[in-house]
Amino acid sequence: MDICEPKQWKTIPISELSQSGYPLYGANGKIGFYKEYTHEKPTLMVTCRGATCGQMHISEPRSYINGNAMAFDNIDEKEMNIKYLFYLFRKRGFKDCISGSAQPQITRQGLEKVTIEIHEKDEQDRIVTVLDRADSLRQKRKEQIKLLDDFLKSKFLEMFGDPVRNEKGWNVVQIRDVADVRIGPFGSLLHKEDYVSHGIPLVNPTHIVDNKIAAGVNLTITKSKLSQLEVYKLKAGDVVLGRRGEIGRCAVVTEKEDGYLCGTGSMFVRPGKSLNQVFLGYLLSSESVKSSLENKAIGITMKNLNAGIVKKFGIILPDWSLQDKFAKIVLLKEGIKVDIVKGKEEIEKHFSALMQEYFR
């Protein structure tokens, strides 16, 4: 690379990190502080080891960049805007120079094959101004979504307290007394030929993202198997819960997902009349409940929950009117969130189009 001198600096052991000092950057951005710094000015870097190999970062002034990231040293600032290079390399990627299978890595030799076309400096500055504005809008939408999620979490704690410590003294019942619990089908029920490209979606923990069943579940089962899997069909209002691998991931099944199948790595809780499904979803996804369920999981190579553990698990049972009040707050905020997410998606499309236009 003619535009810079890629360099890996000495890696600082975790034991030498401190609570204050100069920012220390590792493979995934800032990881702590150190007593010295390697770079006086903001510096462009790429993750050069591990699963996130190829990610780009820009350091703060007076920072230490350790050996898990490749620093792009000695960029001529009169000729190059490093923020322009940051966007350019994000668009280009480094797949063609990542080596290693067990441990992906980027080396100086690998970077030598990287070629790029660059704009004149004035045009670089203009492009950065436009992309920064678009990126700022993206970040604001993300922050709005986070604030809404944080509000609902704090509202839950305000109304019900910590559900495990139960400092508000709610009545505690076992889940089996107020809901039906069913575990997903055993692997022996499903065979390689049962998995098809267009069938009935099968929900496993990896398909649960941000307390929702992700759109476009990519694991489906042939409809001919339905008669044997009828008892594993999800209904709107069920709370599907990860029981293996990602223990505690949960989502309330909506009308759109009615009829999906519970996966082998999941189970579902079907609430009775005394449990509001939205309240139950937030209860089971709270950090303290997830932690308690993880502690009760069994197994050596892979921890898992069985139906018996979850059925006997104690949960708080506030008055129905309070559960319903919380559910209405959630539905109101989720409506606002939908609008924000749509706006974010439009901005993402605009940002991607700009990146495509500037970095063909």
Image: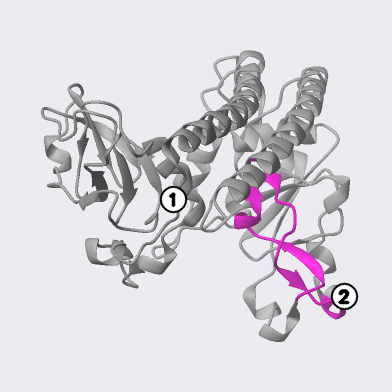
Q: How is the image coloured?
A: one colour
Give the amino acid type for the residue marked by disc 1 in the picture. Answer: Phe
**Other-residue count near label 1 (Cα within 10 Å), few / some / many at <14 / 14–19 / ≥20:** some
Q: Residue at x 33, y 65 (%)?
A: 104
Quadrant location, the N terminus: bottom left
Q: Read off the residue under disc 1.
A: 89
- Left or right: residue 199 versus residue 124 is right
Number of residue marks: 2
Quadrant location, the C terminus: bottom right
C-alpha gap between disc 2 and disc 1: 51 Å
Q: Is residue 219 magenta?
A: yes
Q: Does any portion of residue 235 appear in the rendered image?
A: no
Q: Residue at x 53, y 30 (%)?
A: 132
**Other-residue count near label 2 (Cα within 10 Å), few / some / many at <14 / 14–19 / ≥20:** few
Which residue ends up furthest to the bottom in the rendered image?
193
Residue depth check, mark 2 versus mark 1: number of the one nearer the observer: 1
**Number of the label disc, if any, that sits on residue 227:** 2
> What segment is highlighted magenta in the picture?
197-225
Q: Does any portion of residue 52 appear in the rendered image?
A: yes
Whether residue 116 is situated above or below residue 290 in the rendered picture: below
Give the amino acid type for the residue marked by disc 2 in the picture. Answer: Ser
Q: Residue at x 58, y 27 (%)?
A: 133
Q: Position of residue 196 (x, y in %)?
A: 76, 78
